[in-house]
Amino acid sequence: MTPDPETTPVVEIVRREEFSSAHRLHSDALTDEENRRIFGPCNNTHGHNYALEVVVRGAVDRQTGMVMNLSDLTSLVQEKVVLEVDHKNLSEDVPFLQGRVATAENLAVAFWERLQPDIETFEGCRLHRIRLYESQNNFVDYFGPGPAAARISSASS
Ligand code: NI
């Protein structure tokens, strides 16, 4: 049964996963000197203990009381992201990151692209946010391609 949007509560569920990876901030579009100037010590290979939060928004199913089974979300995040990046060099070893500078911003976008199609197959669920902590105090949020672009253009008009 299709949930009634007037009466069905909408809830965000969150799965957090941690992984440890190496990376090097380096753009092939820049010279070695420019890379060193822009990225500083991050132009050298080094590592982070990352934390990834995947937020799914959806209606609470009347029968199950769930938006999406968290064990399904956990399996998806582990299979599509964590197993691919944990204990790897993100700048060299991960096929879906090839050609992208391994910044937290680009990682969040790439993880969204990996997870979004599978999450949409669960009825009434959509991927709402990817939050990626690169360290305790540094993190990025990605809300998908549409809304972010709309927010920037509305802020500048
Ligand atoms: Ni780094």
Image (cartoon, rainbow, N blue to C red):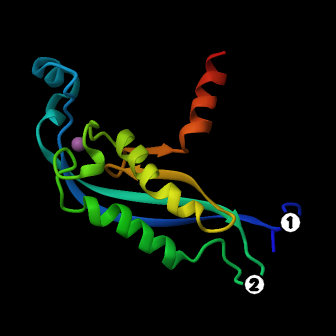
Where residue 112 sits in the image (x, y, percent)?
A: 46, 51
- In the rendered structure, the answer to whether residue 19 lies left or right of residue 65 reads left
Residue 153, above or below 91: above
**Crowd tier of the residue under label 2, counting other residues whose Cα lies within 10 Å: few below 14, some 14–19, many 20 or above:** few
Ligand 1 within 8 Å, label 1 CB: no
Residue at 16%, 46% (x, y): give it.
92
Residue at 40%, 52% (x, y): give it.
111
Where residue 2 sits in the image (x, y, percent)?
A: 81, 69
Residue at 66%, 23% (x, y): give it.
154
- Residue at the extreme right: 6
Tag 1: residue type? Asp
Where residue 90 sits in the image (x, y, percent)?
A: 22, 49
- Residue at the extreme bottom: 63
First in sequence, mark 2 or 1: give its number.
1
- Residue at the extreme top: 157
The C terminus sits in image quarter = top right
Ligand 1 within 8 Å, label 2 CB: no
Q: Which residue is mark 2?
A: 63
Q: Which residue is mark 1?
A: 4
What is the secondary structure assignment of the residue under circle 2? loop
